[in-house]
Image (cartoon, rainbow, N blue to C red):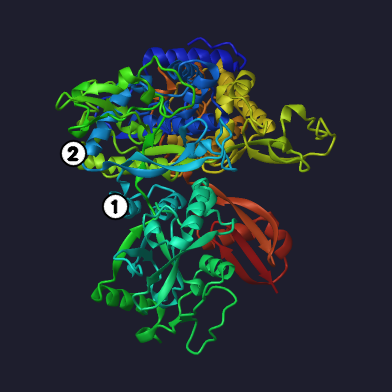
Amino acid sequence: MESPQKTLYQPAAIEEKWQKTWSELGLDKTPQDQNKPKFYALSMFPYPSGSLHMGHVRNYTITDVIARLKRMQGYRVLHPMGWDAFGLPAENAAIDRGVPPAKWTYQNIAQMRQQLQRLGLSLDWECEVATCSPDYYKWTQWIFLQFLQAGLAYQREAAVNWDPIDQTVLANEQVDNEGRSWRSGAIVERKLLRQWFFKITDYAEELLNDLDKLTGWPERVKLMQANWIGKSTGAYLEFPIVGSEEKIGVYTTRPDTIYGVSYVVLAPEHPLTQVVTTSEQKAAVEAFIKEVSNQSELERTAEDKPKRGIPTGGQVINPFTGEEVPVWIADYVLYEYGTGAVMGVPAHDVRDFKFAKEQNLAIKVVIVPEVGAEETLKSAYTEAGILVNSGDFNGMNSVDAKKAIIEFAEKQNFGKLRVQYRLRDWLISRQRYWGAPIPVIHCPNCGIVPVPDADLPVQLPEEIELSGRGGSPLAQLESWVNVPCPTCGTPAKRETDTMDTFIDSSWYFLRYPDAKNEEKIFDSSKVNDWMPVDQYVGGIEHAILHLLYSRFFTKVLRDRGLFNFDEPFQKLLTQGMVQGLTYMNPNKGGKDKWISSHLVDANNPVDPQTGEPLQRLYATMSKSKGNGVAPEDVINKYGIDTARMFILFKAPPEKDLEWDEADVEGQFRFLNRVWRLVTDYAAAGVCKQKADLEKLSKAEKDLRRAIHIAIQAITEDVGDEYQFNTAISELMKLSNALTDAKCNNSPIYAEGILTLVIMLAPFAPHIGDELWQLLGNKNSVHTQTWPSFDPGALIADEITLVIQIMGKTRGSIQVPSQADKAELEKYARESEVAQRYIEGKEVKKVIVVPRKLVNFVLG
């Protein structure tokens, strides 16, 4: 082979060349050969906002390295990409810009696809999905009908955020922290509307128990889900309303405090509020209910706000004592939570204690820390203890009393044991346009009628005017709304709500293995083959809702007989945020306190408007803070491989990453060193000889050891924990060992160069393939087998033995690594170092630490 000319490292030319070559070779296509083990590598798919940010680049780079590694380790890999494309931002953009949401969304998808392709990610674009495409949401609607058939989809009245000016329902994110509509500025009201729900509560216990199966998930994510599901065991108790046949039911985890109840609180929306309110209190109660209806759920439950309430004038009977206690309504009790009523035990609940003090309600101690303890309180006593003032249960400890009180309530028919969950059924209705239409028809004769499968998808009409006002846009399009009933032919109306976009993302990973199937949602054999996802990568902000809903969907569709697995994601990696250098003026408030970094002189950081000194800190990159770094700026200056290497090297994947231009420059210099090292070797002529391992020189043995130490360490680093930062450190060590080696013409040196290029390739794929080609190889480096280490190569022929005299190190010598204690002492005694200190002196004792040191104790 003719020696190549030495060339400069030019990332742009190399990256464009190899991306074109990979595409032509189809290297990233998903193999169908089932003889190899499978590996499904998946990043959480993005919302198509139109531009990638550094958080995207980090997420997709991490998953790409994993996918490339697994291919080299002998797996067939599925590594797809798609778009979470429905939702409010597109609808808002359409209103603001006067363009259809579909046009805006597909333009953004095209732009972001191009940006992703420029990153050189090994994605199979033939599996691409977009949730706003009819060929995708057809199956989202089909899934809805599966839920309906299974009794897991239903309609009921639910409180929503209502904009009284625009006459429309608002999502929580459309209500600001003052409770005003994001568009009209009106104070948002709470209003009851018929809404669609999914019965996720039917799966609460399985969702909780199966967290134990998720051994590849971060513990904190599992804990967040467990807390969200919120299982508790307690008592359901009923308080008869005085003068009525009705009873108020409460759920409590502290039945041991039942004798301390001094009032009961209803949610203002509770139907029994009207029953229990006396005529004298009616006007005041109605005024309070109207006032509370204007508050958002967040406002009502905020810990830092005073709890407001009003007496109804009504009374209930404590069934344990026979005493009458007053019934109040208060803003902090929500009808949607639990039973919509709570029993007030001020002595043993912090919130109740505060409320009782403010409203001058009775505070009765029924639990004390120990027998004979004082019963006066300065604050609520919320721990376990001994029951007092509790009738037949006096003297019992709290734990035993809970059980005994529940058993007594069951015998007397005024209560029972109940397991309850904090988790509520999932409200999936949205009164918006840009989402998957709910595929049901409302018939005056037949009621709710599912749209037949043959008529799916129920497509979004394109000719529609969006204003953000006046309720659901679909409800205003009569030509779309009015249809005959599929069952009886009577004039009927379509459902005009669309689905929560979390539904689209709760099953997309099931579509990728069979993304182009037009006949059914997917081929079950393909999904059973590829699922579960082996490695899922995404932000911690999705730890609860997206991951919980995806688990719920998986269990429901399993129960519908569509596949045979229980959980969608085997391993989960929640990557840290990308943080930028940020400047803040502490004397300003709100958004104005953030000063865009491009307006600040880094050597003299002062506010350009006021001249005040600025604080420097690292914060998550965002437009509002003006601390972002555009991926294209980095790529244009340094290349994609450098950006990837920096992202992988700067911090472990799960930790936050502080963006630093100097560290980016450092990775660029490292890639240049590797480039020179390999091109110098290629220019000198590639060694084709095979090494004779029995006849290696010391320099060859040392280099071979360095090579195989690197293979072992990097393979461990990229194993289960994906510690890419330490893996890149090991690549640097190997590069240094090759630079310092004194055997450049040896087959061992050739082995080291080839090993370095192969192991660099998943991290820096473009330079990896270019260097592989310069070494005379015809195929892609990404088709090579990941190297395995030789344990024999790790054994050193010689070790450094430290010589100590009276515990002080005086020097060291090289000795055979297999020498025993006696031989080590002999080598040490005969060394020049030891002779200098022990000659003519009595050696009282010799301490030998094998493979480390010999210490002479002199008399």
Residue 329 in the image, given as x and y percentages of width and height: 47, 60
Query: Taking 121 as reference, is 305 left or right?
Result: right
The tag earlier along the polypeptide, 2 or 1, is 1
Q: Is residue 49 visible?
A: no
Q: Residues within 10 Å of mark 2 (few under 14, many from 20)?
A: few
351 to 13, vertically: above or below: below
- Residue furthest bottom in the image: 372
Q: Which residue is mark 1?
A: 206
Q: Secondary structure beneath disc 2? A: loop
Question: Is the residue marked by circle 1 packed among few (<14), some (14-19), or many (20+) residues within 10 Å?
Answer: some
Evaluate whether residue 283 shows in this view. Answer: yes
Q: Residue at x 49, y 33 (%)?
A: 59
Q: Quadrant of the C terminus?
A: bottom right
> Residue at 73% across / 59% down in the picture?
836
Q: Which residue is mark 2?
A: 561
Above or below residue 774? Residue 322 is below
SS label for mark 1: helix
Q: Residue 468: x, y in percent? A: 49, 26
Question: Tag on residue 114?
Answer: none
